[in-house]
Amino acid sequence: MSRKKKVTQGTPYFFERVSIDEAFPTIQDVSAEVSESFDGVRDDWPQAAHYDKLLLQISGEEIKCDNRQCKGGLRIGNILRKMVSAKLTVFESIELCNGYEVYGKSKYKCCHAFKVNVSIKYREDKA
């Protein structure tokens, strides 16, 4: 039986398309609130988008940047791996977009930033 379980969209967790339950078997439930700034880190952040476990499954490894010229975003998979590794239940951070804007032969770092709050509830039998 193949370990691969296809998801409908998004980039794969752990280099293959598996469900979030397979990628993170100790997580019972997860939610994230993500605000994206269009001009870097700031004091007043726009309305946050809420991601539950299903939406994180669909988005995959990365929550895409809203900048049309950028091919990057927020690496939510990295945050989940760090949290699970350290057994954290709450994580709050400001992360810069990992993408670049390409104009002709020039490449510029995307100036978008993400304010992220993640909460994890672990399975009691696998914690």
Image (tube, helix red, strand yellow):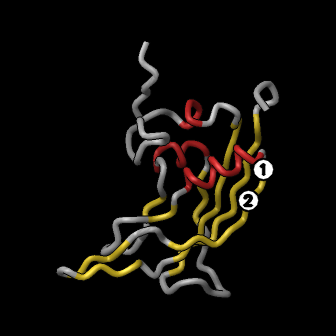
Q: Is residue 58 above or below residue 79?
A: above
Q: Secondary structure at mark 1?
A: loop
In the picture, which quadrant includes the C terminus?
top right
Crowding around mark 2 (Cα neighbors within 10 Å: few <14, some 14 to 19, many 20+) is some
Kind of residue at disc 1? Leu
Kind of residue at disc 2? Phe
Q: Which residue does the numbered mark 1 point to in the structure image?
A: 88
Q: Residue at x 36, y 73 (%)?
A: 100
Q: Residue at x 64, y 72 (%)?
A: 94
Front residue of this view, candidates 64 and 55: 64
Total labels drawn: 2
Front residue of this view, candidates 109 and 123: 109
Give residue 39's position: percent from left, percent from top.
Answer: 50, 86
Q: Residue at x 64, y 62 (%)?
A: 33
Give residue 107's position: percent from left, percent from top.
Answer: 29, 79
17 on left or right of 124: left
**Callout 2–callout 1 Cβ contact below 8 Å:** yes
Give residue 37's position: percent from left, percent from top.
Answer: 53, 79
Q: Is residue 113 above or below residue 34?
A: below
Report how far apart the C-alphas of labels 2 and 1 lie in the structure: 7 Å
Q: Residue at x 73, y 59 (%)?
A: 91
Give residue 116's position: percent from left, percent from top.
Answer: 64, 65
Q: Is residue 23 above or below residue 33?
A: above
121 on left or right of 73: right
Q: Is residue 37 above or below residue 52?
A: below
Q: Which residue does the numbered mark 2 point to in the structure image?
A: 91
